[in-house]
Amino acid sequence: MKVNFYATLRQIVGTKIVEVDVPEGITIRELLHKVARMYPALSREMFDKGGNLYPHIHVFVNGRESSFIEDNLEAQVKSTDTISIFPAVGGG
């Protein structure tokens, strides 16, 4: 599965795209935690102390924001899907 990182998350990972081996039926939440285990510095940026995704982190599956997908972070994704992860971005 391709996982794209943007802004400060890309700086932590060191590249724009990471290939992640995932089992069929993995949820978005499980995938995010797997990626955070691969890159431990991401965990602080993406999850609170309870392991919940910060509200300012936006996850897209094949270009569609996860909040608009039925079951949100509990939705299952396929190994052929593309996941994009965006932190809050500010500026002017």
Image (spheres, grey):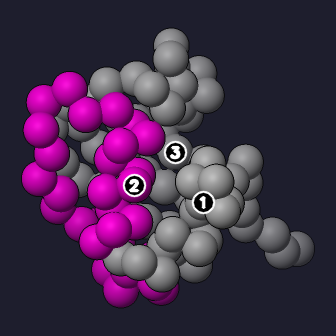
Which quarter of the picture shows residue 3? bottom left
Disc 2 target residue: 33
Q: Earlier in the sequence, mark 3 or mark 1?
A: 1
Measure the C-alpha gap from mark 3 to mark 1: 13 Å
| Residue at 49%, 55% in the rendered image | 85
Q: Is residue 40 above or below residue 51?
A: below
Disc 3 target residue: 59
Q: Which secondary structure lies at badge 1? A: loop
Select label 3 or label 2 by which is in front.
2
Marks 3/2 in contact by CB < 8 Å: the verdict is no
| Residue at 58%, 62% in the rendered image | 46
Q: Quadrant of the C terminus?
A: bottom right
Measure the C-alpha gap from mark 2 to mark 1: 9 Å
Which quarter of the picture shows residue 44? bottom right
Tell me if mark 2 has few (under 14), some (14-19) or many (20+) residues whose alpha carbon lies within 10 angstroms of its own: many
- Decide if residue 32 is in sight here: yes
Marks 2/1 in contact by CB < 8 Å: the verdict is yes
Which residue occupies the foreground of this view, 43 or 90?
A: 43
Q: Earlier in the sequence, mark 3 or mark 2?
A: 2
Residue type of the residue flagged with mark 2: His
Disc 1 target residue: 47
The verdict on residue 17 being magenta is yes
Residue type of the residue flagged with mark 1: Phe
Which residue occupies the foreground of this view, 7 or 27?
A: 27
Residue 80, position as x, y percentages in the image? 15, 36
Q: Earlier in the sequence, mark 2 or mark 1?
A: 2
Residue 36, position as x, y percentages in the image? 40, 66
The verdict on residue 33 being magenta is yes
Task: Work out which residue is located at the far front of the displayed protein and give it.
Answer: 50
Q: Which residues are magenta?
A: 10-38
